Image (spheres, rainbow, N blue to C red):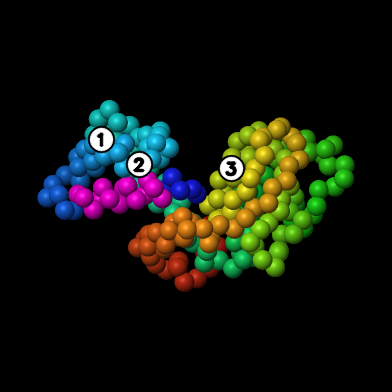
Amino acid sequence: MNTLDIEIARFMQTSDLSFYFSGDDDKHAFAFRYFKNYAREQLSPKAYGRICQDLKLKNQQGFTRSYAAARKVIDSAIKMRYLVTTLSDQERVESMLAKFEKHRISVKRNIAPPAAVDALLKEFKMGVIFIPDASPETISSITIYYSFPAPAFLHLVRDTAAAWGFAGDFPKFEKNKLEKVTLELTDADSDQKEMIELGETKAMGSHPHLVNKSQREFI
């Protein structure tokens, strides 16, 4: 979850609002024209490049399908960004670790990497994460050690951590090398606050029954 997601979400909201005040009766045609006319102007170069990777721009039919799919992905990410803030600290950390395990990454809770860890790393076919303190008193920062056989696993962990509200300075990927990173909680950052607020609005609209209770099953 990053600032590009909320920038794109805001653009989509502006497009929707413009349609309602336009007097046009074809929402899909309007969205196609609006994107063609204003996306490059209103979005940053990075956000524009990001959304264009997911869209088919040759014709309205292809655009409509791909635009709806892109909106669904971004809306889900923003809702998730809010929903994790409704969990207890322990639920938040444990659900993130469970997400890693869902992708077959081995997670070693409350275990520091052993001294002779290098000889063991290749045994973990999908990579391994060591968390010396999986139940910290505060989740403002969490230190993890990890090793992965391919960069895709590192990208997955980084993106999942971001969805749960954590960011860290991950070293450049090296195959089967033990690395250390400290994940910092980002809830207090201004851009993250905006994402959380937008996520709450979307969650209230589509899943109001989830907002005031544990989201363990939803996540």
Residue 53 appears anywhere in the view? yes
Q: Is residue 78 magenta?
A: no
What label does residue 43 carry, if any?
2
Q: Quick check: 216 left or right of 94?
A: left
What label does residue 219 carry, if any?
none
Q: Pinpoint residue 207: horizontal percent, then vertical percent.
A: 40, 63
Q: Tag count in the figure?
A: 3
Q: Pinpoint residue 60: horizontal percent, then vertical percent.
A: 24, 34
Give SS at disc 2: loop
Q: Pinpoint residue 153: horizontal percent, then vertical percent.
A: 63, 39
Is 30 or 73 nearer to us in this picture? Answer: 30
Which corner quadrant of the image does residue 156 belong to? top right
Residue depth check, mark 3 versus mark 1: number of the one nearer the observer: 1
Q: Residue at x 62, y 55 (%)?
A: 184
Q: Amino acid at mark 1?
A: Lys
What crowding class fits label 2: few (fewer than 14 Cα within 10 Å), some (14-19), or many (20 or more)? some
Give SS at disc 3: helix
Q: Residue at x 43, y 47 (%)?
A: 5
With respect to residue 188, does 105 lie above or below? above
Extreme residue toward the top, this view: 58
With respect to residue 33, does 15 lie above or below? below
What label does residue 36 carry, if any?
1
Mark 1 to mark 2 CA distance (whole Å):
12 Å
Q: Residue at x 29, y 35 (%)?
A: 63
What label does residue 156 carry, if any?
3
Residue depth check, mark 1 versus mark 2: number of the one nearer the observer: 2
Q: Which residues are magenta?
A: 6-19
Q: Residue at x 34, y 51 (%)?
A: 10
